[in-house]
Amino acid sequence: MKLKWNKAGDDSEVLILAHGAGAGMDSMFMERMAELLCQSGITVVRFEFDYMQQRREAGSKRPPDRQPKLLVSWNQAIERVYEEVKKPVFIGGKSMGGRMATLLAAEQSGTGFLPVKGIICLGYPFYASGKVDKPRIEHLEHIETPVLILQGERDAMGSLEIVSSYLLSPKVKVSWLPDGNHDLKPRVSSGHTQDGHLNLAVERIKQFADS
């Protein structure tokens, strides 16, 4: 497993950031978020799930691995980073990457095994696009690890209108970005910009990490 580091300093908080289902750790979104987070004083470590690494090597379009294998990769990434930094870290990611981080934390809650301080999700897939009637939130109703979700108000996988009706654990905070889509990108007519929203997301992440 290859790790990509954006180091902010020896004493900085550390965030392991996983990619979403369709684009790897070097997508424009992931690169920009890592850059902004590092500038804010947070060290960012990125990795790729096995299927994405195989896509890169073979040039073929493979579907994401099944959940158990994704969680194994997450565990491996945490172990590798913890060996390096010797302190608890934050974990999270874009869409699927963030969802897998929450599932891992919920699965290992109370075991004392996971050296994780909190979880940060960028565009959480509360439901598959077009499947509002099948929410994927059961573990978020009881999760004990602090979770910050940065979500666009019109995200096709979790809009403000729909998500506001969910009864989530008090440990889960959903922070809304005006008119943002699944990539936190607003429409031009809204008066907001994606880069403005990414900067705002970083401010909120920094507050969460420092709290």
Image: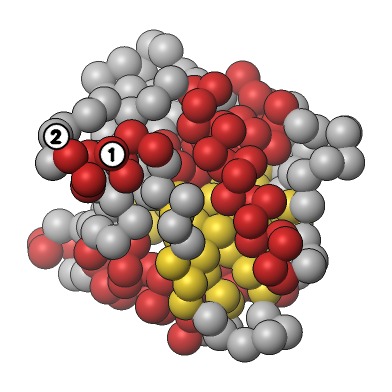
Residue 122 located left or right of residue 25: right
Amino acid on which disc 2 is placed: Ser
N-terminal of the two: label 1 or label 2? 1
Residue at left offset 78%, top offset 52%: 115
140 or 167, nearer to the observer: 140
Q: Where is the C terminus found, in terms of image quarters?
A: bottom right
Residue 65 visible here: yes
At which x and y percent is residue 128?
A: 33, 23
82 or 167, nearer to the observer: 82
1 or 118, nearer to the observer: 1
Q: Quadrant of residue 133?
A: top left
**Residues under numbered marks 1 and 2 in contact, where contact means CB atoms less than 8 Å apart:** yes
Which residue is most to the top?
133
Circle 1 residue: 54
At which x and y percent is residue 26?
A: 28, 61
Circle 2 residue: 60
Q: Is residue 141 above or below residue 29?
A: above
Amino acid on which disc 1 is placed: Gln
Q: Is residue 75 above or below residue 9?
A: above
At which x and y percent is residue 9?
A: 62, 87
Residue 206 located left or right of residue 70: right
